[in-house]
Image (spheres, rainbow, N blue to C red):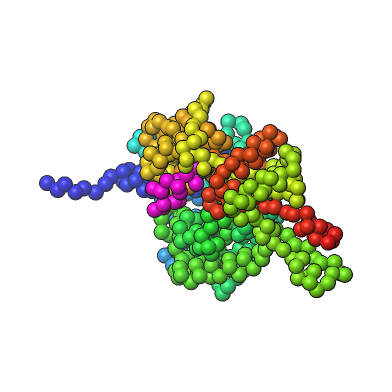
Amino acid sequence: MARIEILHPEVRSKIAAGEVIARPHSVVKELIENSIDAYARRIDIVLNDGGKQDILVNDDGCGMSRDDAVLAIERYATSKLKTVADIEHITTYGFRGEALASIAQISQFELETSDNTGGTKIIVAGGELKDIIDSHRPQGTRVKVSNIFFNLPARLKFLKSSQWEKRLILDVVKSYALINPSIYFGLAESDRKVLDFVATDSFEKRIKMFFPNRVVEALIHLDIKIGAVRFIGFLTRPDFFARHHMNYLYVNARPVRYARLYRTIVNAYQNPKSPPGFVLNIEIPPSMVDVNIHPTKQEVRFRDEHYVLDLLSQAIKTKVFTKVGQVGFRTSPPVSATRDERRTDTKFVQETVLPYSSERVAELLSDRESNEFWQLHDTYILSQTKSGLIIVDQHVAHERIIYESITKGKGGSQRLLFPITLELMPEEYRAYQKTKLLLKELGIEFKEFSAHTIVIDSLPADAHVNRDDLVDLFKELDALGNLIKQRNEVAKVVACKSAIKAGQRLSINEMRSLIDRLFACENPYTCPHGRPIVIKFSLDELGNRFGRA
């Protein structure tokens, strides 16, 4: 008797649906793409229980007729292509004809649509058509997806907490909202508005809605076309080191995961300690890119990858780095300035960074004139000295303090009043497994709660962190690669994530304590990653800048 059998169509359908729909955020992604392809100008999304119980997506697009709506829930039903050759000319997000069929297969599904000639409502449960009825609604489409994976318990048990699933959905909505500024995107959960991105007439205005001013002010606009390829977007200046969450890659406005593209950008910045921020769209003829690698369509491949990556590297080096010729500021010489004065007037602030030596520490401490401090933009601490002033970057100063404290085992740890529970992604959990012994040595105590879930009980005594900082800690540890087993490298990441942040207001006593502890360090002038901590201006330098000399 043969042991090999042909799978039943119902089993095949569920397996195929699992390739397209991995979790609630996959549903949101596919429905958003359908709405954009339908020329929607407004997309509203409502969640219940992080999307595990209900997902509702409503748009004002072109809608569908009854015949089209009934066909839309069948596998391989699409209006986007008719022949294999059409794949090389795809300009829409969707084209495979699998999304709605897959969603309907693993959920309780309602589709309500109108093309302005009449409305239709279709009800499906687990892939089985239950009803087709008339509907009264304005033009557009509304899809409600309930109890995802109710008929696939093996897949259901892999869903995480509501907060975790909601965070993934937020990332999806943001990625599409960013690249489609002319469309309104709204996201609500339990009658509470979570995201509200009004439509705007430019990519730049939408970016300003997403990111804080400190990031926006550090962006350089890139818009260059080389041959048939155009690179358009924004990248951070090479001298920008602040924390950010700005890593968005698109190919023909399609959000993609493309490791080689990311590495090309980082390499163009000469592998900085802090990765650059970017929102970059690569416009390329559809025939030069393959978008049919995976059913989710999040992975693409260029036909001539080396060519595109070389063009991208050239674009960044010629357009980004040529616009950043200096650090700090310079003043134009007055009209009456002499030739020698013009030559010496142009000076980089970076030139005034103090070199490290024990003699310089003693010199600066003796130069302190008062215990008065001022905070500039909640980021820099200014203090007067006998010969001028010093400026201290509060984040890297605190980073140096924590680094020396934990590497020398002097700081101890502080037990948290409310332990922090973290659900880690697989790569973050791997980083935790590789570094947990080192982390305990450095003052981070934890318990393993369940698969991929840990509870942080204690942190280094001087740590200033929240849940997001701890998640980022494991992401950065994973990014260390082969250096992850080196104690000093792990300590650098812990110190960076534990330090007070730029933008955090400090009291006079806190500033005084920070400065005193900084100059008690062995090296108070550079952070563990090599960035300057202290910049000094003499009265002579200030006089020159104001034309007094």
Magenta portion: prevailing SS class: helix
Above/below status of 353 relative to 306: above
Residue extending farthest to the top is 417
Query: Which residue is pictured at 60% across the width and 59% down the height?
Result: 238
Which quarter of the picture shows residue 103? top left
Above or below residue 207? Residue 129 is above
Left or right: residue 150 compared with residue 40: left
Q: Residue 316, relative to residue 150: is it above or below? A: below
Left or right side of 369 for 235: left
> In the image, what residue occupies the spot 26% across and 46% down?
7
In this view of the protein, can residue 341 be seen by the observer?
Answer: yes
Q: Quadrant of the C terminus?
A: bottom right
In which quadrant of the rendered view does residue 305 lie?
A: bottom left
Quarter holding residue 299 = bottom left
Residue sitting at x 67%, y 63%: 326
* Residue 197 seen anywhere in this rendered image of the structure: no
Residue at point 76% right, 70% down?
A: 343
Query: Residue farthest to the right?
Result: 336
Left or right: 468 as drawn, with respect to 426 = right
Q: Position of residue 65 (x, y in %)?
A: 55, 49
Looking at the picture, how far across and down is residue 498, in whole percent?
54, 39
Q: How many marks?
A: 0
Magenta residues (range): 479-494
Residue 253 in the image: state x and y as whole percent: 56, 58
Q: Position of residue 32 (x, y in %)?
A: 55, 48
Q: For this rendering, which residue is in front, 48 or 489?
A: 489
Is residue 486 in the magenta section? yes
> Magenta stretch containing residue 334, yes or no?
no
